[in-house]
Image (cartoon, coloured by chain):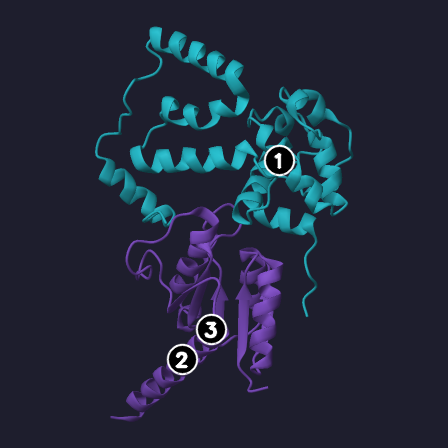
Amino acid sequence: MTERPSFQKEVSNLMSVLDGNPIDVCIQCGTCSGSCPAVEYMDYSPRHIIALIRSDLKDEVLNSDTIWCCSSCYNCTVRCPKEIKITEMMYALKRYSIWKHQYREGAIGPAFSRKFVRMVVKTGKSYEPGLAPTFMFRYGMRGMIDNMQLGMSLFNKKRIAILPKTVKRIKNFRRVLNRIIPIGVEK
Amino acid sequence: MNGKRILLIDDDPDYVYAVKMILEKANYSVRVSYSPKEGYAALQDGEFDLVIVDVMMGRGAEGIIVARKLKKDRELKKLPLLMITGIREQTGFFFIGDPRHETFLPVDGFLEKPVNTEVLLNKVRELLHSDQTAELKQEKQGEEP
């Protein structure tokens, strides 16, 4: 019997094998956490997440909102002295979390990702007013008003459209997608 | 053991554990790879009669890349390839019509997770058998002048 892979092994299987060092070379210097612009919104810092993965604490990692707060700015990746692709690792954890449906109940990240991908597949473009209404009620009245104000100021500067638009030749776009990944009917 | 060797490439340890147990109960010898990379290495240093592969692995639908790669290889394309996927459950999307396609998804069998034990064993038996009959046909054709 092949030995059951550890959580660390599972995560590294999800990362690209071609580039970057494995997570186990991390020296816990904290450069990633220090460089991260979103760290104040996270419950565990990126350094902490790496330590949790190495300790096989799967539930703590998947229940944290760190992976969903990551804005993929790649600051950590370019600054890591051991050349670990931390942003890649965050993406790997997002995939793991979504594919296995393991995330904290009510987490916005997974639902947002799904909705966003569906929108891009359908129209070939992102349409912000379509995304916002699903989530703005979660932050109560205050959040709703903030969102509306933001929407209005963007609209006044012609940064967002009222009606969703699709890319030209959407059928060709879908055909391209179909060759890369099997996106067919939504069930 | 009935001597048939199966290679299972899937990144989900729980699923691998279950499928391996079912196949071993049915007297197949099973080797497991948890990533496409390990899978290629296993194919290089061992001989197999059937390959079972998952779709969603690594950075996305890498199982499809594995299938295309195997079917391009002169030696390995003779191996029957069974694809078992939970893509509908994992991503919410599924293939249009028949997922099998000779260039886009060149597999010999396609099943969707969760797979019923009987269905899985029947499919495996069918693929292994079709492989044998194809070989027999080739041999017969070779004998005939």
**Disc 1, SS:** loop
Residue furthest out toward the front = A141
Q: Position of residue A133 (x, y in %)?
A: 42, 24
Chain identifier, purple in the render: B
Q: Is residue A14 above or below residue B2?
A: above
Query: Which chain does the residue under circle 2 lie in?
Result: B
Residue receiving disc 1: A85
Residue type at mark 2: give it: Glu
| Direction from residue A126 to residue A104 in the image, left or right | right
| Direction from residue A14 to residue B142 in the image, left or right | left
Viewer-closest of B55 and B75: B55
What residue lies at 39% left-to-right and 69% top-to-bottom? B109
| Direction from residue B10 to residue A1 in the image, left or right | right
- Dot label at residue B120: 3
The 10 Å Cα crowd at callout 2, few under 14, some 14 to 19, many 20 or more, is few
Q: Position of residue B96 (x, y in %)?
A: 29, 54
